[in-house]
Image (cartoon, rainbow, N blue to C red):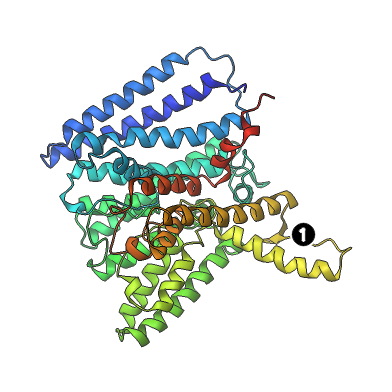
Amino acid sequence: MRFNLKVIGDILGILLLINGGFMALCLPISIYYGEHDWIAITTSSLVTLGSGFLLRYLTRKKKSKELKKKDGYLIVTAGWIVMSIFGALPYIISGSIPNFSNAFFETISGYTTTGASILTDIESVPNGILFWRSLTQWIGGMGIIVLALAILPFLGIGGMQLFVAEAPGITPDKLQPRIQETAKRLWFLYVGLTLAEAIALYFAGMGPFDAINHSLTTMATGGFSTKNDSLQFVEPVIQYIVIFFMFLAGTSFTLTYFGLKRNFKKVFKNEEFIVYFLFTVVITIIVTATLLVVQDQPFEKSLRDALFQVVSLVTTTGFVSADYTSWAPFLSVLFFVLLFVGGSAGSTAGGVKVIRHIVLFKNSFLELKRQLHPSAVMPVRISGKAVEQNIVYNVLAFIMIYILVFLVGVILLSSMNVDFDTAFGAVATSLGNVGPGIGDVGPMNNFEGMPTAGKWLLSALMLLGRLELFTVLMLLSPHFWRKR
């Protein structure tokens, strides 16, 4: 198979060291609140750090640092799985989630920034464990930035190449000469926005612990909350702050970087951002109008509820401000469709991504013209630039496989005696990394009642969706394991 196993092991060891280090950050929270979970956090951190050091020690004599595509696929998938296994330790050891299947589900839901939860009483969980729960999403969101910038384009994942074409340092503009420098700038941006939201939430009246946790999970577009009712009963100003940062988190971090550098020409010439913004506005208007008629609510509340839920679902954050499944059947269908939209490429959002939808629709309309003018050369253009045909094919294949995986997932989950609506909602929200769905996994429910086999299936779908399908599915191909 000729994998560079020593380098792969070394990188996995580094990931475990990072994981263990973040676990240790939860210890001061536990000690401050005087809760018993400090023992579980300390033990989990030491086990994870020790495993990371051991793995690096065993792979210290590396023959070559060169990584091939096969190594990349293996590292990305194995990394997320290994992180999730060790990340489940605080839940298990503390007794907050003693069952391994449930603990793994909660953890991989965090790292993939899905936000689907099995916890029925979140507020009874110790604060140190809750902070770790939020950190798993923040770590996952930060990891996605690195994936989108440095790894997925290298692996040929369609749509991500388009993001790289806009990233500072990789474009002809050469704002930064090295991809590592670009990643550092985007990380600083990620940290800065997280702090900015935490400060804004605190001054808006949210407690410091809740403000920090919600800012961590907002910028990761994860949606884990420290409250059983999510953000339903907070002050309107807090909801507006979260809406703003959810929208930012669903925007390409590169565009946000350009915006902060006052290069607004780059921002407003980006076709994906324009479609993302206008789509959000149009759907919000439709939902607001429906609420005014059906719910007979005041205009401001109808607008706020509509804007919050639309932005939350489009960006795959999954925070909840109201039970949208009780509004109207039409809106339930509409919100189900939003589970398949996704945010922008190069953001922490999951889902299909807006850029892929644009490529799909543009190519479909161009295909009609090609039938009339078979000799004409009509490339798909995004933001005025022609998209390479191999990327178009990759995007079309991605969407077809996405639909196929969704249908297979629904069939498999239905075979476990899960009702049709719930199976549709659970698979769609897991594959799209959204969080709440429809049926028994709607905004007022959780995934605790899912059969054990169903939780493992949904965990696999979360990983598939987060790693852009091909990264994981490639490992199932016999060609991948053949010696070359």
* Residue in view at x 22 percent, y 39 percent: 98
Quarter placement of the C terminus: top right
Residue, far left: 34
Which residue position is annotated with label 1?
379
Please state which of residues 415 and 124 is positioned toward the viewer in this rendering: 415
Exactly how many numbered labels are in the figure? 1
Amino acid type indicated by mark 1: Pro
Residue 42, percent from left and from top: 22, 29
Q: Is residue 421 left or right of residue 162?
A: left
Please state which of residues 229 and 388 is positioned toward the viewer in this rendering: 229
Residue, far top: 61
Q: Is residue 164 left or right of residue 55?
A: right
Quarter placement of the N terminus: top right
Q: Is residue 205 left or right of residue 282?
A: left
Residue 16, percent from left and from top: 38, 28
Task: Give above or below for 290 relative to 85.
Answer: below
Q: Residues within 10 Å of mark 1 (few under 14, many from 20)?
A: some
Residue 384, percent from left and from top: 71, 61
Please state which of residues 456 and 293 is positioned toward the viewer in this rendering: 456
Residue 449, percent from left and from top: 29, 54
Task: Give above or below for 176 relative to 5.
Answer: below
* Residue in view at x 47 percent, y 26 percent: 11
Q: Is residue 266 visible?
A: no
Residue, far right: 375
Task: Give above or below for 231 relative to 468.
Answer: below
Under circle 1, the secondary element is loop
Q: Is residue 78 left or right of residue 38?
A: right
* Residue in view at x 45 percent, y 60 percent: 315
